Amino acid sequence: MARIGIVVSEFNYDITYLMLQKAISHARFLGLEITYVFKVPGTYEIPFAVANLLKRNDVDGVVALGAVIKGATKHDELVASQTARKLMDLMIQYGKPVGLGIIGPGATRMQALERVEDYARRAVEAVAKMINRSKSLEEKKFAGETVFIE
């Protein structure tokens, strides 16, 4: 059974709490074991928590959940883009998948609420698929025929 951690932002918690509940439910449906739920103050802090979880031997992948709501400035764009960039870097650094379940930038509160389930489920599914496919790649070997990892 694959083991995952979930990192969830407390900022916009009316939205991210719902995302967390959907992610937990979907992870259990997929047969994933949730070893940690790590709450952080905001989306900007998500990479720090993800890095700490990816270091652990009892975590095969991490789901990152947040909601970056559009404000009067471009702060939402900065936070969302830098967070996503760092999460990609951490995936490569640790060789473990990170599911991007961060709504925004540019989303209104209403748009974010409409996307809660989709973003949470897709992030969990991405991590589950990448954990399984990474394990599959380790088990297979090229022997003259193309190897498909699906």
Image (cartoon, helix red, strand yellow):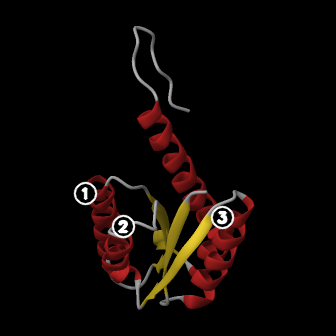
Q: Nearer the viewer, residue 122 or 90?
A: 90
Number of numbered callouts drawn:
3
x and y percentages locating residue 48 in the rendered image: 30, 78
> Few, some or many C-alpha atoms within 10 Å of disc 2 (few <14, some 14-19, many ≥20)?
many
Which amino acid type is marked by label 1? Answer: Gln
| Quadrant in which the N terminus is drawn | bottom right
Which quadrant would residue 83 be assigned to in this image? bottom left
Q: Earlier in the sequence, mark 2 or mark 1?
A: 2
Res. 93 mark: 1
Spatial CA distance of label 2 from label 3 is 18 Å
Name the residue: 29% across, 73% down: 78
- Does dot 3 land on a helix, a strand or a loop? helix
Q: Nearer the viewer, residue 40 or 52?
A: 52
Marks 2 and 3 close (CB-CB < 8 Å): no
Q: Earlier in the sequence, mark 1 or mark 3?
A: 3
Q: Which residue is mark 2?
A: 54
x and y percentages locating residue 108 in the rendered image: 55, 77
In-image side of 124 versus 135 (left or right): right
Res. 27 mark: 3
Res. 108 mark: none
Name the residue: 66% across, 64% down: 27
